[in-house]
Amino acid sequence: MSTIYYFCPDFSPPSAGTRRLYRHVFHLNQLGLKAAIVHQKRGFALTWHGYKVPVIWLEDQPTIDKEDVLVFPEGMVGLMKETRRFPCTRLAVVLNWAYVYINLPKGENWKDYGITQAITPSPFIKDFLEWSMELKVTLIGNYVDTTTYHYDPSLKMPKICYMARKDLSGEILNAVFMRKASSAGKYQWVCLKDLDEETYGQHVLESRIFLATSTQEGMPTSILEAMAAGCLVLGFSGMGGNDYMIGDGEKQNCFLVENGNYPALGKLLERITDGWQMDSHRYDPIIIKGIETARQFQNLDKEGESLKQFFGSL
């Protein structure tokens, strides 16, 4: 029986990307296919996300058969190149469009290494890869955990959460409002960095506002999780978020700001918190639309079936 090997960076801090790789492998094993995560250093594995899957290590020099399938994240260009003469099927799993060309020598693309197809949960990434590399790209499902991310109004506090791993806009705005006399400065600010899944989720459940500060997103899982938890989302789409984030009109589910324009985001935040002081239900329709947006990604089986269909077709 062939094995599907998902290569994963030896990266310890919790991230939606590495969690998704482990979840893919979990799905495939649950569906009767044989799959494993591949890390580089012997003994390294990620456990914070709760998905228990087989793990092997490159240091042990595993044997790869011609019937096997190798799946490389977009940033692992070196391994794509090193395995280009392997007789097995090889493909890319792409979760962030901004990392696709970072490690590629100028003038080369994945087709030079024999990678001719890819999978992604993001329509934006699919379009980008089909245009830039002329690859065959298949959309797969996405999942937002309903047990962790759900709306409970009784949990909400005057709390703003933001991420800082990809962009410092949230940190800068936090520093601004620590000194500025403003309604936004009266909120508790929480940086969602280097937290275990339970603690991260609890902060999101308790926050009224989620600042979307990444300018480079594929499938914006953190934003969808915040919407599912009933946060009012303000900020940048990261480009990939444009497939799901609606900043105005009848279907508005968030407040959008030009990517990277954190001064505009700060002024918007001030208006939002001022508005909430005057009317505590002022933004309820937008929050409800956000919850509805996230609901379409709350079927775990749908993600698994899309993976089974894809790998079954190889």
Image (cartoon, rainbow, N blue to C red):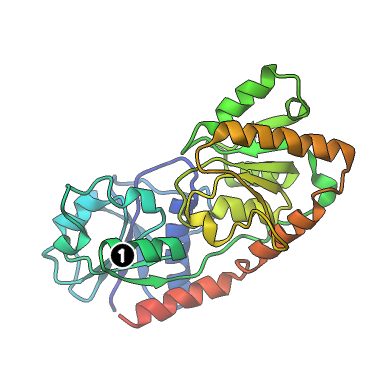
Of residue 154 and residue 266, the one placed in the foreground of this image is 266
Residue drawn 42% across the image and 81% down it: 309
Of residue 267 and residue 81, the one placed in the foreground of this image is 267
Q: Where is residue 21 in the image (x, y as percent from the top left)?
A: 42, 58
Residue 5, visible in the rendered structure: no
Element at badge 1? Answer: helix
Find residue 206 and report its image quarter: top right
Amino acid tagged 1: Trp
- Residue 251 lies left or right of residue 41; in this view the side is right
Residue drawn 63% across the image and 22% down it: 176
Image height of 314 relative to 208, above or below: below
Residue drawn 30% across the image and 71% down it: 3
Image height of 112 relative to 78, above or below: below
Image height of 182 relative to 16, above or below: above
Find residue 207 and report its image quarter: top right
Q: Mark 1 points at which residue?
A: 131
Residue situated furthest bottom in the rendering: 313
Residue 113, visible in the rendered structure: yes
Image height of 201 relative to 130, above or below: above
Q: Where is residue 53 in the image (x, y as percent from the top left)?
A: 44, 61
Residue situated furthest front in the rendering: 249
